[in-house]
Image (cartoon, rainbow, N blue to C red):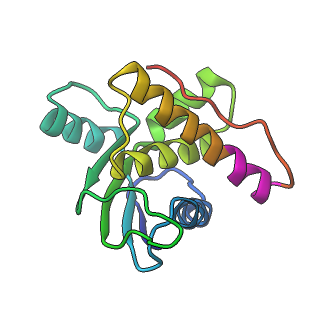
Amino acid sequence: MNTEILNETDAEVDLDEVVALTEYLGEALHMHPGAELAVTMVDSAAMSELHVTWMDLEGPTDVMSFPMDQLHRGEPDKPTEGQMGDIIICPEVAEAQAAAAGHSTMDEILLLTVHGFLHLLGYDHGEPEAREEMFALQRHLLLTFFAARYDGRTDIPTPTEV
């Protein structure tokens, strides 16, 4: 998984940890090692502009995904190749959501990274059944990443409704 990561904010974000997560997600979801992804941290003004432009909704949001090649989850013997697209995260919104949920801002950013990654693969949560599928997979991926990365940690962040 080739991940380009940028932090266009003053927020302190552990970019190496985000890349480690995207590499894990690429392996877990059977993406080709050459698949490309961009993750960008933006401030609330930039996110507000994107939110109005693409969703016709005022104000900043936590994460937006912009798929490139309309990829889907691969299979163990047939990994998916191509350009996944862009995940845009707003650390300011993530910080507020983390405080409301009682976990760290970095945990929230990791949660949002998984959420955005799944959207790039066509997962959605508009309908109850699709929401259940997406959020169960999101939880599983976070749980396995946190357990492997943080010495068996199982207290994963849960989504915050805003």
Q: As rendered, which of 30 and 69 lies closer to the eye?
A: 30
Residue 144 is a magenta residue: yes
Q: Which residues are magenta?
A: 143-150
Q: Position of residue 81 (x, y in %)?
A: 35, 73
Image quadrant assignment for residue 68: bottom left
Question: Residue 65, image x and y in percent?
Answer: 31, 47
Secondary structure that dominates the magenta span: helix
Is residue 42 visible in this depiction of the protein?
A: no
- Residue placed furthest toward the bottom: 34
Q: Residue furthest front?
A: 77
Judged from this view, the residue extending furthest toward the right is: 151
The answer to whether residue 30 is seen in the rendering is: yes
Q: Does residue 49 sit above or below 10 in this rendering?
A: above
Residue 107: % across, % down: 64, 42
Left or right, 16 with respect to 126, comes to: right
- For the point 77% across and 36% down, which residue is it? 155
Query: Residue placed at 38% from the left, 66% from the top?
Result: 37
How many marks overall?
A: 0
Image x and y of residue 75, in percent: 48, 64
